[in-house]
Image (tube, coloured by chain):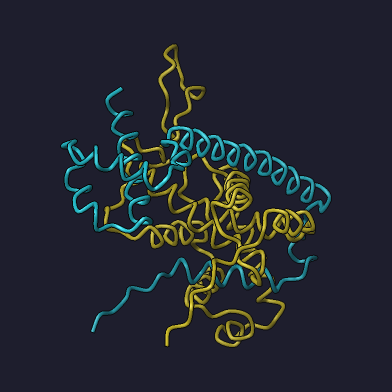
Chain colours: A yellow, B cyan
Amino acid sequence: MCAASKPEERLTRAKIESILTSFTPADWQRAISMAAHFCGGVTGWKAEDLLQETLTKLLAGERIWRPGLHPLVVLKTAMYGIAFNARRHNKRSPVDENVVLDPFEAEGEENTPVARGKVTVTPEDVALGKEQMTQLYAVIAGNEDLELLVMAWADGIRGADAREMLGWDAKKYDAARNRLLRQLAKLDPERRS
Amino acid sequence: MMITPKNEFKTFIDTLVDELIEMSDQQVLEGLNPAAVQAEGLRLLNVAKAEAGRSRLAAAKAGYAASKKRPALAAVEVSVEEARRFLAEARNDERFTLAARNLGELSDDEVLDLYRKLKALQSSQDGVEK
């Protein structure tokens, strides 16, 4: 016998507002850290833009907040969809928005825009996620510990399992994780130094 | 057997979020001003609330505008006799010939149902012809 399908369960706008209003500073920072990583490759978006768009869509009911989930997991799922849609939009546009044009850096009398950064030359069949990882590896290039940590996380190995696999103690693991989070923030174009 | 390519990025993000959840607040906020971080978060939330409100209002307006365009189906309360008379006349209208045949075999409910459908069709055609 088939079970009758349940009506779609979602939190009300009031409940969502209540959860978000009670976010601690650390919760907001966690959300921003996550957004910064999703922003890599989404031109014109900074972490705050992505987080705000995500909150808007959740509050407007355009993205569903299912009951019983950790707020960060809900934000992650929504951000994933929004960031990837934005990235796909960039890819389809005839203008490569990944080239940053800055007329104020032009030298001489002509205000010819100068391209900063590289034109993204990515074969269309390259998975967007793979591209994102490539950017991450580029940011941490040369730092062996961080590369190992990213490889472990990308394999789904974390915490005590990752420490054991890498042969690190808790102190070294925490230090590497904190360094990695700081590096992830650099994927946000606004924070690149 | 098909092999599904592994989504390294998705796995990485899942792990990152698990780590962020597990980290202590102190570790997460290391080197940052907690008050400033919270103020920024609440600012984003307030902007999002205003945007979401505008979006919902726009959707409500669009829904209202669409409902105004729909033919008024409510005003079809007629007697069975009137409905049968209308359908009998409609039998000679080439637009409704097929729908109105075998009128005598229809129950009262079927007659009223058919009347409503033909009225709705008539309204929509009148709308198109305008």
Near-viewer residue (A20 or A96)? A20
Residue at left offset 60%, top offset 48%:
A60
Q: Position of residue B83 (x, y in %)?
A: 35, 44
Among the 4 quarters of the image, the one containing residue B119: top left
Q: Is residue A135 above or below residue B25?
A: above
The C terminus of chain A - image quarter: top right
Residue at left offset 55%, top offset 73%:
A149
Q: Position of residue A123 (x, y in %)?
A: 27, 53
Q: Is residue A24 above or below residue A57?
A: below
Q: Position of residue A55 (x, y in %)?
A: 63, 50
On the question of residue A130 being in view, the answer is: yes
On the question of residue A91 being in view, the answer is: no
Count of numbered circles on the image: 0
The residue at the far top in this view is A109
Q: Position of residue A82 (x, y in %)?
A: 49, 52
Among the 4 quarters of the image, the one containing residue A98: top left
